[in-house]
Image: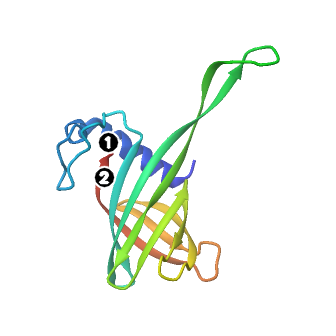
Amino acid sequence: MNTFSTLARRTFLLLLCLMPAACAGGGNGGGGGNPGTTAGSNRARFTFDVDLQGVPGTLVMEVEVINQAGAIWGPGSTPQITAVISAGTFIIFTAGELTSSVANYIFTGENNFADFTEPATSATFRVQWIETAQGMTMVVNPFGPGPVSYACVLTSAVLI
């Protein structure tokens, strides 16, 4: 199991246990809740403070966790689905934005990797997420050239 999925699942469990009021329209330090969201949501928004080699940045990441499942088909030439069985594994989809005084990037990803794009130039690079005690480490260009790591401290997490 990858480390980012461990972080996401642990955070989701914490949110499910501690924040049902916030999900029903309250708020947790601003931004408000989503009145239509229930405690069983599979989506969350995480906000991190990022140290970009001395330049402060903010990473806002929306995460959706999808349980992988398989269909069981009935007999015949035009079978119907007769059951759906959980595979016991999850796919974590991420999307968001990293902003600082000197840069702005958008990203989408799956599990513990994401592809970042700078909208002004369309330049792209890959990032790997690694769980840490205070949030995560963002490793830019994990496969080279020259991977660079940035500390990301979790500042908020809410179900959406």
Q: Assign a secondary structure to mark 1.
A: helix
Q: Amino acid at mark 2?
A: Ala
Foreground residue among 142 and 61: 61
Decide which of tag 2 and tag 1 comes sooner along the chain: 1
Quadrant where the C terminus lies?
Answer: top left
- Residue 57, how many percent across, how many down? 33, 75
Question: Where does label 1 land, which residue?
Answer: 14
For disc 2, the neighbor class at 10 Å (few under 14, some 14 to 19, many from 20) is: many
Residue 157 - label: 2
**Residue 105 got which mark?**
none
The image quarter containing residue 87 is top right
Q: Contact, CB < 8 Å: mark 2 with mark 1?
A: yes
Identity of the amino acid at label 1? Leu
Cα gap from disc 2 to disc 1, whole angstroms: 10 Å
Instruction: Tell me which residue sits at (52%, 40%) in the image.
Output: 66
Q: Is 92 placed left or right of 37 in the picture?
A: right
Q: Is residue 12 left or right of residue 73?
A: left
Query: Is 145 situated above or below 28?
Result: below
| Closer to viewer: mark 2 or mark 1 | 2
Q: Position of residue 8 (x, y in %)?
A: 43, 49
Instruction: Name the residue: 49% across, 62% down.
Output: 130
